[in-house]
Image: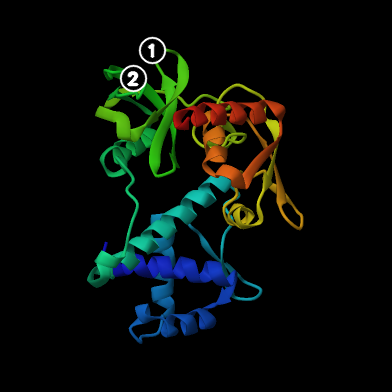
Amino acid sequence: MARNIVARYVWLVDTISRYGRITLKDLNDAWLRSEISEGKPLARRTFFHYRDGVEEMFDINIQCDKSTFEYYIEDSGNESNSRLRSWLVDSVSLSGMLSNAHEISGRIILENVPSAREHLPLIIDALKQNRRIRFSYKSYMRSQPTDGIVLEPYFVKIFKQLWYVIGLNVKEGSIKTYSLDRISNLNLQQDTFTMPEGINPSEFFKDCFGIITNQNSARRIVLRVEPTQAKYFRALPLHHSQQEEIHDQYSIFSYKMRITYDLKEEIMSHGSTIEVLEPQELKMLIQNELVEALKNYQ
């Protein structure tokens, strides 16, 4: 499909999303104000053609309110699907923007996402077909890679520029997480599997920060955060359960999360701008880590 057609699909979704509801006349006015129109109006037939293309490519339905003749994005009712569609539209939009900025490419700095292009497409195919995958894995905890791992992939997740696949390790009979940048010799198997009932990606990580989970119960976690750092927490919450109490010289952020390695590392990465108030278990965990770290400088 031509790149400019995809760009028009993205423009249509982005514009209707920003307005919430918009008539075809107002949509055409916005179209004419944009460079993508090349000065040509958005014909009704063309709009319907683009609407069908948006549904086919992004699984996004543009509906019409017959009482007001306003168009809007239909709510799928599925939070995971909505996040995926939003991410997909944003990615395509950004890709188109950057592809048109080749003359200033030396002034645009991007972050690398290891193995996303190499392994992610095959794993996506495995998810679609519910087929097992087989691969070798080089754990940081072992000197040699583990060969012949057979996995029933349940879902994938990106965290801090790394993609992970989560699924059932057939040999061990347990759910494991594997980083795509440490996978090699990846193959799609003919064997299929059935997704077990009750396995839901959002529920699986609901009480966790990051990619590591455990069987511990979610705890009430309370952090005292300095004012400047608190602004970053407001802009990018650590967790969906985040709540804030604003004070003159600090903010109190509270969460319902499990205590995990990823959470501990995240808190420590903010240094003295954060203090753990609750629970005592997490506070002692951070204190012990800091004591061990100080030994390197004595």
User: Mark 2 falls on what kind of element?
Assistant: strand
Q: Which residue is drawn at 30% across and 70% down?
A: 4
Does 71 sit left or right of 96 as displayed? right
Does 75 sit left or right of 3 as displayed? right
Residue 171 numbered mark, or none: 1
Q: Where is residue 75 in the image (x, y as percent from the top left)?
A: 59, 56
Above or below: residue 200 compared with residue 104: above
User: Mark 1 falls on what kind of element?
Assistant: loop
Q: Classify residue 290 by image quadrant.
A: top right
Q: How far apart are marks 1 and 2 (CA)?
A: 7 Å
- Mark 1 and mark 2 residues within 8 Å of each other at the beta carbon: yes
Mark 1 or mark 2, which has the lower sequence index?
A: 2
Residue 150 numbered mark, or none: 2
Q: Where is residue 239 in the image (x, y as percent from the top left)?
A: 61, 43
Q: Which residue is drawn at 57% across and 59% down?
A: 74
Tell me if residue 199 can be seen.
no
Residue type, mark 2 in image: Val
Residue 57 numbered mark, or none: none
Q: Where is residue 223 in the image (x, y as percent from the top left)?
A: 68, 42
Tell me if residue 115 can be seen.
yes
Comparing 166 with 71, the one in front is 166
Residue type, mark 1 in image: Lys
How dense is the environment of label 2, judged by Cα within 10 Å: few (below 14), some, or many (20 and up)?
many
Comparing 108 with 203, the one in front is 108
Does 216 sit left or right of 157 as displayed? right
- Which residue is outermost to the front? 298
Above or below: residue 192 compared with residue 33: above
Looking at the rendered image, the quarter that the N terminus falls into is bottom left
Above or below: residue 67 compared with residue 161: below
How dense is the environment of label 1, judged by Cα within 10 Å: few (below 14), some, or many (20 and up)?
few
Does 38 sit left or right of 273 as displayed? left
- Which residue is outermost to the bottom? 39
